[in-house]
Amino acid sequence: MNTTRRTFIQTTSAAVLGFPAILRAKEPNDKLNLAIIGCGGRGGANLGSVSTENIVALCDVNENNLAKAAEKYPGARRYADFRKLYDEARDIDAVVVSTPEHVHAFATMPALKLGKHVFCEKPLTHSIWEARMITEAARSAKVATQMGTQVHAGSNYRRVVELVQSGAIGPVREAHVWVSRAWGWQSEADAASNKDIVSVRERPTGASPVPAGVNWDLWLGPAPERPFGEALPKAAGWTWLNVWATWCKPCVDEMGMLTRWREAFTRENVPVTFELLSVDEPSSQPQLEKWREKNLPGAIRWLRSEDDFGPFLDGLSVDRNAAIPIHVLIDPKGNVRCVRVGAVHEENYGAARDLITQAE
Ligand SMILES: NC(=O)c1ccc[n+]([C@@H]2O[C@H](COP(=O)([O-])OP(=O)(O)OC[C@H]3O[C@@H](n4cnc5c(N)ncnc54)[C@H](O)[C@@H]3O)[C@@H](O)[C@H]2O)c1
């Protein structure tokens, strides 16, 4: 039988579920035509992960994020509205959806209807009803699909799926699903005890100007009309930025100490949020994210790839040619209060705490 690229993908993809499933199943030297919908944090990282393929279309409601993604793929068509992208999707084999979750189902459904393979970030949808609609559509479309809960593509989970499907525990009549805590929608006390960085109880009130380059109407998409509000409030207090990379051994060695410091600050009620700035290649970020989730639960997040490093230094008013800061302490008003180009050591803990608690 003459196996074309498309039939090859369709017949093998169900069994091959590494990230992204759609890429593992193609024939060598035969590239897929991909569309990227949502080019922000995860979108940027996912773009790095699929960079071996043909990126034929990019879509984002934020012109700035779109332009940044287009720097590497100047030949890709650009869209603010994914409905237009799907109007012109003949050459597209698969889409990668990394928008916020209220849009996931709406950006995924047209792909399924058009027979395109889909990788969509987690959570799959905004409501259970949407999840059911997408499940049905995916079943009829017979395409390769994957949600961005990457660990579910690992062999351990796949073996469990096989066991259940083989009838090892008999017919499954009921499934109970739970989560140990809220991420974000919680009181400050809960956020502190969960070692989480976000605590939100209310929707933003009032209206702020829509940032330049953002199409707010398209951002809202299927959500009810509401004015633009400032983004989720960050935990009040100081920010400790730590620039590092996996290839920098001293940086990695310092992690355990910083994690202990963070716990000590929490115990002593010293208001500091740690933010980890990875300068690793975006393509390695999914793996790093897994490492981070295991080793630094909830405490520190990936912020930037190497591309953002120059603008980051500019933002701190640090000369791009000067030594790279490794530790930066920013006060609640956004003023840089301490820049350190080298490591910090156990004996520096008291000085850091004093700086934070005694600053005006
Ligand atoms: N798999 C993981 O490990 C993981 C980790 C973090 C976040 N996520 C998920 O990834 C998704 C994106 O999160 P993020 O942190 O990248 O957010 P983000 O805000 O950094 O990026 C979202 C991007 O989508 C764009 N966008 C918004 N509406 C759009 C639309 N209608 N069409 C096209 N573009 C649109 C935004 O302008 C922005 O560039 C979320 O659903 C989040 O839950 C997954």
Image (cartoon, rainbow, N blue to C red):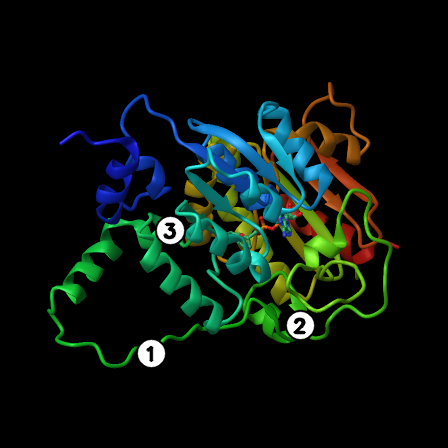
Nearer the observer: mark 3 or 2; the answer is: 3
Front residue (pair 288, 104): 104
Q: Residue at 20% of width from left, 31% of height from top? A: 3
**Residue 188 marker:** 2
Q: Residue at 54% of width from left, 68% of height from top? A: 194
**Residue 132 marker:** none
- Residue for badge 3: 146
Measured as percent of width and height from the top left, residue 263 is found at 57, 60
- Residue for badge 1: 176
Badge 2 amino acid: Glu
Q: In this view, does 221 lie above or below 253?
A: below
Callout 3 secondary element: strand
Callout 1 secondary element: loop
Upstream in sequence: badge 3 or badge 1: 3
Nearer the observer: mark 3 or 1; the answer is: 3
Q: Residue at 72% of width from left, 39% of height from top? A: 63
Q: How crowded is mark 2: few (under 14 residues within 10 Å), some or many (20 or more)?
A: some
Upstream in sequence: badge 1 or badge 2: 1
